Image (spheres, rainbow, N blue to C red):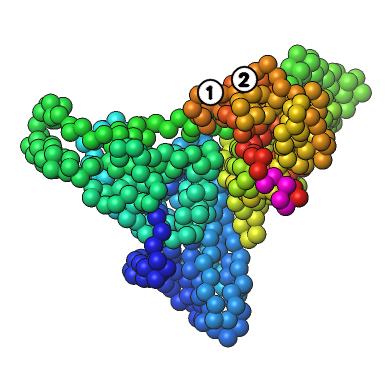
């Protein structure tokens, strides 16, 4: 995918120049940076990028805020200080508002330079309604999707394919730019800068599928050709990188003839003849693309709105029977009792004062009763799974969380800028992204459960040091947490287990168990589901049949490699680490 640096720079300059539109405000100019696709995805991040230049002789403070017009409580803002003569790309983003619903919004943008609001037309879609959808697949614009659409049966799932309106060389440099996508297809001829390639591979590590299509007659990327030209699939973290040739050179003539006949029948409205056309057999490359266009097993994951039942979050129930009796007493006291007492003392006019007073007293009693019964504290529960590549020192964490609180946390929520978030039953999604993802406290609505997911791909030095010994495997816990259960698949596929919890830094000897590791081809989707079951059941047994040699499963009761965004008063966390290890070089750096 790589090209010489001068080719990349030249392509970026030539392609970016016509697509940017600058507006000048004194010494400061601001222009749009185009995105990979023209529409938003339902489960993706809202992202807008601007290029800001300060041609003046003193620093310029620029604040940009994009919010939804009307009553929809969504916004994102960022403030930057631009040095004299400097140019900086300013990215604004926010997580999707609610993964469970389809919605549209109308945008407004506020631009403030050195404390003064300025008028502008920098937001092309300002005032227009943007509909969010679940696209699923992003394609490089260099792939001839329209020409080959008969091979993908787009009448069934064409909406899941989105062709990029800018070259791959201009695609995003962050994981969030590819959130919500199941797979990405590019051409082996595309120019892919190192920063874009790094972001794409990070997305693959979190579970995505990157497909590199080799055009007919073009050479295969070095070291990637599969047997007999079949697709070459390489596992990378939770995801995979696929290289394939959809149309072999020797099949080009047959394909062009088929597409011509298809276009002729379609142009004449002869739809009944389309089904009778026999498609040329193109081999595994086109079959793989067809299957990816309709489904991708790893991303068949539930959305946050379904986490409530899975997590079993503790939510207090209101004693309705007792509340009914309180209301009955209230009706009796505020009506007959109130009237009869005042009449006895001939103070009937005071009913104008006693009625609201009694109402206020009962309201306070009800609020106090509910507060005392459920407690004045926040509670949260989390299940997480991490895939840790100890040699590559990279981890991909997928966590599911549920939060319930009588009041929203005063400090709001703070997540790392690289975290991918999805919410269900969220309140106001008001984001400040100056240094991190800071979401206002209105995200959590009082007494309404908030469910959300956190995906984080990060460099990690933590690991288990594993070495063979005569009677088993010696393990030193370097994960930084107490491990309640530990299971290791040895080099021969045998399963080694710990008899007791392993404290941080502790060295233990694992005995060989009765189970046997996986002898099937490794399936990351199956392994992920087994790890989720292990977390729920608090034992490693569900994973034993899926672990190949060189992997381990460790269970802890605290969040690892991610943060919940705030500090709950009561927090129950369970976490599974699926680690890839090797004996060689484990102690070179002393970790």
Q: Look at 45% across and 40% down and name the residue there.
A: 234
Q: Is residue 4 left or right of residue 67?
A: left
How far is mark 1 from mark 2, CA to CA? 8 Å
Pick the residue in front: 405 or 21: 21
Pick the residue in front: 217 or 277: 217
Q: Are marks 1 and 2 in contact (CB under 8 Å)?
A: yes
Q: Which mark is residue 519?
A: 1
Q: Residues within 10 Å of mark 1 (few under 14, many from 20)?
A: few
Q: Which mark is residue 516?
A: 2
- Residue placed farthest to the right in the image? 345
Q: Considering the numbered disc 1 on the image, is that residue within a helix, a strand or a loop?
A: loop
Q: Is residue 359 magenta?
A: no
The N terminus - image quarter: bottom left
Q: Position of residue 203 (x, y in %)?
A: 51, 46
Q: What segment is highlighted magenta in the picture?
A: 585-589
Q: Quadrant of residue 433?
A: bottom right
């Amino acid at each position: 995918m790589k090209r010489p640096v001068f080719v990349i720079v030249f392509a970026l300059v030539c392609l970016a120049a016509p697509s940017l539109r600058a507006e000048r405000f004194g010494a400061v100019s601001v222009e749009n940076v185009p995105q990979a696709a023209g529409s938003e995805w339902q489960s993706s991040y809202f992202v807008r990028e601007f290029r800001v230049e300060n041609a003046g002789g003193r620093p310029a403070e620029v604040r940009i805020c994009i919010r939804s017009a009307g009553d929809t409580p969504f916004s994102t803002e960022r403030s930057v200080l631009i040095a004299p003569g400097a140019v900086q790309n300013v990215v604004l983003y926010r997580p999707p508002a609610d993964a469970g619903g389809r919605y549209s919004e109308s945008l407004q943008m506020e631009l403030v330079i050195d404390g003064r609001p300025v008028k502008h037309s920098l937001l092309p879609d300002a005032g227009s309604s943007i509909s969010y959808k679940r696209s699923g697949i992003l394609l490089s614009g260099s792939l001839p999707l329209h020409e080959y659409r008969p091979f993908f049966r787009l009448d069934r799932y064409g909406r899941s394919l989105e062709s990029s309106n800018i070259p791959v060389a201009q695609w995003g440099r962050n994981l969030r730019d590819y959130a919500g996508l199941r797979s990405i297809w590019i051409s082996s001829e595309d120019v892919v800068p190192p920063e874009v390639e790094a972001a794409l591979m990070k997305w693959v590590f979190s579970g995505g599928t990157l497909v590199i299509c080799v055009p007919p007659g073009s050479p295969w990327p070095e070291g990637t050709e599969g047997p007999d030209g079949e697709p070459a699939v390489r596992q990378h973290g939770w995801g995979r990188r696929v290289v394939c040739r959809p149309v072999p050179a020797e099949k080009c003539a047959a394909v062009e003839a088929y597409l011509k006949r298809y276009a002729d029948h379609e142009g004449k409205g002869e739809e009944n003849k389309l089904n009778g056309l026999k498609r040329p057999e193109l081999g595994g490359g086109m079959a793989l693309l067809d299957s990816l266009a309709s489904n991708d097993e790893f991303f068949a994951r539930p959305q946050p709105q379904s986490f409530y039942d899975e997590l079993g979050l503790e939510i207090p129930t209101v004693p309705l029977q007792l509340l009914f009796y309180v209301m009955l007493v209230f009706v009796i006291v505020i009506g007959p009792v109130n009237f009869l007492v005042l009449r006895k003392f001939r103070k009937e006019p005071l009913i104008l004062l006693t009625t609201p007073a009694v109402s206020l007293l009962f309201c306070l009693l009800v609020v106090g009763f509910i507060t005392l019964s459920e407690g004045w504290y926040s509670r949260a529960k989390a299940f997480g799974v991490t895939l840790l590549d100890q040699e590559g020192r990279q981890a991909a964490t997928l966590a599911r969380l549920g939060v319930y609180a009588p009041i929203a946390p005063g400090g709001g929520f703070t997540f790392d800028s690289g975290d991918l978030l999805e919410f269900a039953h969220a309140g106001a999604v008001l984001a400040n992204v100056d240094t991190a993802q800071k979401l206002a406290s209105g995200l959590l609505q009082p007494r309404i459960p908030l469910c959300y997911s956190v995906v984080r791909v990060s460099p990690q030095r933590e690991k288990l040091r594993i070495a063979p010994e005569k009677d088993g495997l010696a393990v030193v816990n370097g994960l930084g947490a107490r491990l309640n259960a530990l299971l290791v698949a040895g080099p021969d596929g045998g399963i080694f287990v710990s008899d007791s919890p392993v404290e941080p830094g502790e060295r233990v000897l694992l005995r060989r168990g009765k189970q046997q590791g996986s002898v099937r081809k490794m399936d990351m989707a199956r392994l992920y589901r087994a790890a989720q079951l292990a977390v729920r059941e608090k034992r490693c047994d569900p994973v034993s049949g899926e672990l190949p040699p060189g992997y381990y499963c460790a269970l802890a009761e605290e969040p690892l490699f991610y943060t919940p965004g705030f500090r709950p008063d009561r927090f129950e966390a369970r976490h599974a680490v699926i680690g890839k290890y090797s004996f060689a070089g484990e102690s070179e750096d002393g970790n």
